[in-house]
């Protein structure tokens, strides 16, 4: 192994990796040098590599700011640490010796501090598992702006009313897309936030403003600034702290409404995988984030050239040196008490594909993250909040990822379009894992009606995106109907109503702990909320639901679907 490759390995870069087809791939030395330089580890010459290795060893040899461990398990304390005193979160001494800490750990989960002459270390003791979902139940997934109300787009007020109505109908959960802060009120891309610590203030409830123009699409260039002006009138000023407090009260009220409606879970928040490199999080604390690198995905069948998401993420080395405080603060800002959280691109807990600025996405590499530490902190914060945890685990899973999630009590996702065997046949209902969250689709996939009618194929042809042919789709329709149709005649491709009924009934019968149905599928919408890989050629994040929630829930087709869900999964 060359010194360059040794430095890359020591820095957490994976020089070799396995692609979606199972083929071994190798990162070029040029890419390694570019990524290492962005990590502040210059590697252009042998002398630079030697200095970078020495600098990295020095940083790694420091007394750790935090050590994580599982309850009743040995704590890997540094050998040079002697005669330390363990203190609990209240500052009270815990009567336990160093030998016992190293041998059998601590029984009670929580945060502790270990004081010694060599310095202080924060100790995080995780519970065995995240809180369970409990009984099999169902809920819906909602894009908040799509809710119709008195304004141009939905907010925490309309969401609160929707939660009450859905709870009365038997739903136990409402999953939402991220509500992170965005710098520009005229834009709305929830997975490209400026901050994951602050809320999108546009979701705060404001004084009544002019109703929407009746269009099925939101014009954010007008609606965003108009809502911001209304919010300033509502709170009596434009102080950012006032607007944040107003939004936070509105979001808290949603979860309170869910509990009052009898929901077992209530709100499931969504945590984006990264932030805008020019946004407020990265500006206010640049050392905590990767600089000169973007996160994305390597080449695969869905993206042959790879993907650059235009986002940055935490620096794994900075996280460790900061005692994981930025990660903990992010979890606390987004985890509803007694609710749930979905971690977008959950693989990022273990590794992220990083791409040097100015280079093609295919010239990136995987950067390792302290998986065990991050998992323990997720378990601990979920235990403190009494919240369930879902990780988006769609795609090529890193080795050991699924087993680690299962052991931690974190739920994966089983999405109908992707739940197939090696021959392409849709899996039977019984094959869905009990620890999974079953879904008919996500915000990035065609709706059931859109897929069955081929609307997504029309978009692919319009935008010259390639993809499957109509003949291939017809074969896939037959395959889906074999799985869900119960030997009844297959509907025509322009008749998706029965397909939706059968698909939701099929998913309701799976062992999955939770079934989440996008509102777009519940009401039979043709168009999907977002088309990945597009910016302005498809109306992403702009679509409204066809009516107000109370009217939608009273529709015969929606009532029929909800009745079936309650029969299969009701309390």
Image (cartoon, rainbow, N blue to C red):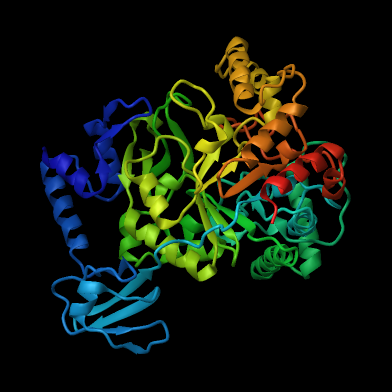
Q: Is residue 552 left or right of residue 190?
A: right
Residue located 34% across and 29% down the image:
19
Q: Position of residue 276 (x, y in %)?
A: 51, 48
Question: In the image shown, does 535 or 286 lie closer to the viewer?
Answer: 535
Q: Position of residue 446 (x, y in %)?
A: 64, 30
Residue 463 visible? The answer is no
Q: Is residue 294 left or right of residue 261?
A: left
Residue located 49% across and 61% down the image:
330
Q: Is residue 219 above or below residue 282?
A: above
Q: Position of residue 267 (x, y in %)?
A: 65, 58
Q: Is residue 377 above or below residue 399?
A: below
Image quarter hosting the N terminus: top left
Q: How many marks?
A: 0
Residue located 78% across and 54% down the image:
162
Residue 66 visible? The answer is yes
Q: Is residue 40 left or right of residue 447?
A: left
Question: In the image shown, does 14 or 512 lie closer to the viewer?
Answer: 512
Say which quarter of the image contains residue 502: top right
Q: Residue furthest front?
A: 487
Image quarter hosting the C terminus: bottom right
Say which quarter of the image contains residue 328: bottom left
Q: Is residue 284 above or below residue 522?
A: below
Question: In the image shown, does 516 or 204 lie closer to the viewer?
Answer: 516
Q: Position of residue 280 (x, y in %)?
A: 53, 57
Residue located 60% across and 26% down the image:
483
Q: Is residue 520 above or below residue 163?
A: above
Say which quarter of the image contains residue 196: bottom right
Q: Residue furthest top?
A: 471
């Amino acid at each position: 192994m060359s010194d360059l490759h040794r430095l890359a390995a020591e820095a957490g870069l994976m020089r070799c990796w396995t692609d979606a087809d199972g083929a071994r791939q190798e990162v070029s030395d040029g890419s390694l040098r570019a990524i290492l330089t962005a990590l502040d580890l210059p590697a252009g010459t042998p002398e630079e590599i030697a200095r970078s290795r020495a600098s990295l060893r020095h940083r790694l040899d420091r007394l750790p700011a935090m050590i994580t461990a599982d309850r009743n398990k040995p704590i890997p304390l540094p050998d040079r640490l002697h005669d330390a005193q363990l203190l609990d979160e209240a500052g009270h001494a815990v009567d336990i010796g160093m030998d016992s800490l190293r041998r059998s750990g601590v029984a009670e989960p929580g945060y502790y501090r270990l004081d010694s002459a060599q310095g202080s270390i924060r100790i995080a003791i995780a519970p065995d598992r995240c809180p369970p979902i409990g009984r099999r139940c169902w809920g819906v997934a909602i894009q908040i702006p799509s809710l119709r109300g008195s304004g141009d787009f939905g907010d925490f007020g309309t969401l609160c009313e929707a939660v009450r109505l859905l709870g009365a109908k038997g739903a136990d959960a409402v999953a939402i897309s991220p509500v992170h802060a965005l710098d520009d009120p005229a834009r709305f891309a929830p997975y490209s936030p400026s901050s994951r610590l602050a809320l999108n203030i546009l979701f705060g409830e404001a004084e009544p403003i002019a109703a929407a123009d009746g269009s099925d699409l939101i014009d954010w260039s007008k609606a965003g600034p108009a809502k911001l002006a209304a919010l300033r009138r509502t709170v009596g000023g434009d102080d950012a702290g006032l607007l944040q407090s107003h939004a936070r009260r509105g979001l808290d009220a949603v979860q309170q409404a869910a509990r009052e409606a009898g929901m077992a879970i209530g709100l499931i928040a969504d945590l984006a995988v990264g932030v805008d490199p020019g946004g407020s999080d990265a500006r206010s604390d640049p050392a905590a984030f990767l600089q000169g690198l973007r996160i994305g995905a390597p080449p695969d069948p869905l993206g042959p050239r790879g993907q650059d998401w235009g986002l940055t993420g935490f620096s794994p080395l900075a996280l460790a040196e900061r005692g994981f405080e930025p990660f903990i603060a992010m979890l606390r800002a987004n985890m509803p008490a007694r609710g749930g959280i979905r971690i977008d691109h959950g693989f990022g807990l273990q590794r992220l594909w990083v791409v040097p600025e100015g280079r093609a996405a295919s010239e990136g590499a995987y950067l390792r993250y302290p998986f065990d530490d991050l998992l323990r902190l997720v378990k601990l914060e979920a235990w403190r909040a009494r919240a369930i945890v879902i990780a988006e685990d769609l795609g090529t899973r890193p080795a050991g990822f699924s087993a680690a999630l299962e052991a931690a009590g974190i739920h994966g996702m089983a999405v109908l379009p992707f739940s197939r065997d090696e021959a392409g046949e849709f899996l039977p209902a019984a094959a869905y894992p009990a620890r999974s969250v079953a879904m008919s689709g996500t915000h990035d996939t065609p709706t059931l009606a859109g897929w069955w009618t081929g609307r997504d194929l029309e978009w692919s042809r319009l935008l010259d995106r390639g993809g499957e042919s109509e003949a291939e789709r017809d074969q896939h329709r037959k395959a889906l109907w074999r799985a869900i149709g119960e030997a009844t005649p297959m509907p025509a491709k322009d008749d998706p109503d029965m397909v939706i009924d059968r698909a939701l009934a099929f998913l309701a019968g799976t062992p999955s702990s939770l079934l989440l149905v996008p509102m777009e599928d519940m009401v039979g919408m043709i168009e999907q909320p977002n088309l990945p890989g597009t910016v302005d050629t498809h109306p992403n994040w702009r679509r409204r639901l066809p009516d107000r929630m109370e009217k939608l829930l009273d529709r015969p087709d929606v009532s029929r679907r909800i009745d079936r869900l309650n029969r299969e999964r009701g309390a």
